[in-house]
């Protein structure tokens, strides 16, 4: 499938309008699985559905709304760009939901659950995006690894292969990136409380 996707991506780059129609059926199921896995890790109350996320990301990709992509360089590049598009869509939605006219920082509580604290591994998408931008300035390769792991759900070995680095290097990058992102997100939260 990789060679077929690569061939179609080349045709899209060359301006073949019909090529984009051929691409979606080849990548849709995989993009949908990635979006579903990504959304499952979000905070409760997420309003975007996996199908809508895939369609919006796909439109941005074939419309080249994602900046600085250059020419498509195969399936790994396409899915990396898909991860970036999904991240941007989710961050935009998080910012819209946080806007004053949408309730600002007020949280909806069910009456019977008003005294129960919700715990879990949910994370503030805006804080994560800002921390990822900082990581990208420091090390673009590490930021790309995080996007591949977090937003597309690739495993560490799959991410290493997509980036063309050894699994040991990817594991070191992953541990370092997780620590830096955690530090930045926590420092931003404490700054807001001060």
Image (spheres, rainbow, N blue to C red):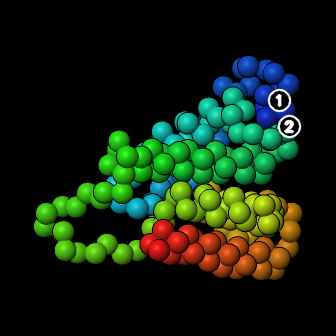
Sequence-first disc among 2 and 1: 1
Q: Is residue 104 above or below residue 117?
A: above
Corner quadrant of residue 22: top right
**View extreme (front): residue:** 194
Corner quadrant of residue 40: bottom left
List x then y, in percent, for residue 149. 65, 64
Residue position for label 1: 13
Residue position for label 2: 71
Number of other residues with Cα within 10 Å of mark 2, as a class: few under 14, some 14 to 19, many 20 or more: few
Residues at circles 2 and 1 in contact by the CB criterion of under 8 Å:
yes
Q: Nearer the viewer, residue 116 or 8?
A: 116
Determine if residue 74 is in view: yes
Q: Quadrant of the N terminus?
A: top right
In the image, what residue occupies the spot 53% across and 57% down?
Answer: 126
- How far separated are the C-alphas under marks 2 and 1? 6 Å
Label of residue 189 in the image: none
Determine if residue 79 is in view: no
In the image, what residue occupies the spot 79% across and 20% down?
Answer: 16
List x then y, in percent, for residue 189. 50, 71
Q: Nearer the viewer, residue 16 or 186?
A: 186
List x then y, in percent, for residue 17. 73, 19
Number of marks: 2
Q: Is residue 118 above or below residue 94?
A: below
SS of the residue at dot 1? helix
SS of the residue at dot 2? loop
In the image, what residue occupies the spot 64% across and 45% down?
Answer: 85
Number of other residues with Cα within 10 Å of mark 1, as a class: few under 14, some 14 to 19, many 20 or more: some
List x then y, in percent, for residue 55. 55, 36
In the image, what residue occupies the spot 35% across and 44% down?
Answer: 102
Corner quadrant of residue 8: top right
Q: Is residue 177 above or below residue 91?
A: below
């Amino acid at each position: 499938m990789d060679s077929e996707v690569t061939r179609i991506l080349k045709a899209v780059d060359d301006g073949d309008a019909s090529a984009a129609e051929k691409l979606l059926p080849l990548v849709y199921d995989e993009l949908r699985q990635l979006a579903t896995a990504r959304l499952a890790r979000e905070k409760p109350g997420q309003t975007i559905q996996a199908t809508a996320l895939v369609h919006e990301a796909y439109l941005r990709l074939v419309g080249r709304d994602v900046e600085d992509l250059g020419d498509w360089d195969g399936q790994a590049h396409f899915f990396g760009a898909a991860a970036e598009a999904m991240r941007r869509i989710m961050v935009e939605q998080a910012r819209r939901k946080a806007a004053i006219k949408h309730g600002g920082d007020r949280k909806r509580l069910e009456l019977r659950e008003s005294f129960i604290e919700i715990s879990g591994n949910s994370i503030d998408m805006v804080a994560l995006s800002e921390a990822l931008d900082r990581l990208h300035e420091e090390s673009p390769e590490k930021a790309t690894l995080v996007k591949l792991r977090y937003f597309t759900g690739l495993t560490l070995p799959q991410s290493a292969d997509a980036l063309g680095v050894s699994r040991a290097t990817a594991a070191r990058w992953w541990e370092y990136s997780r620590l830096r992102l955690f530090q930045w997100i926590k420092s931003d939260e404490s700054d807001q409380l001060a």
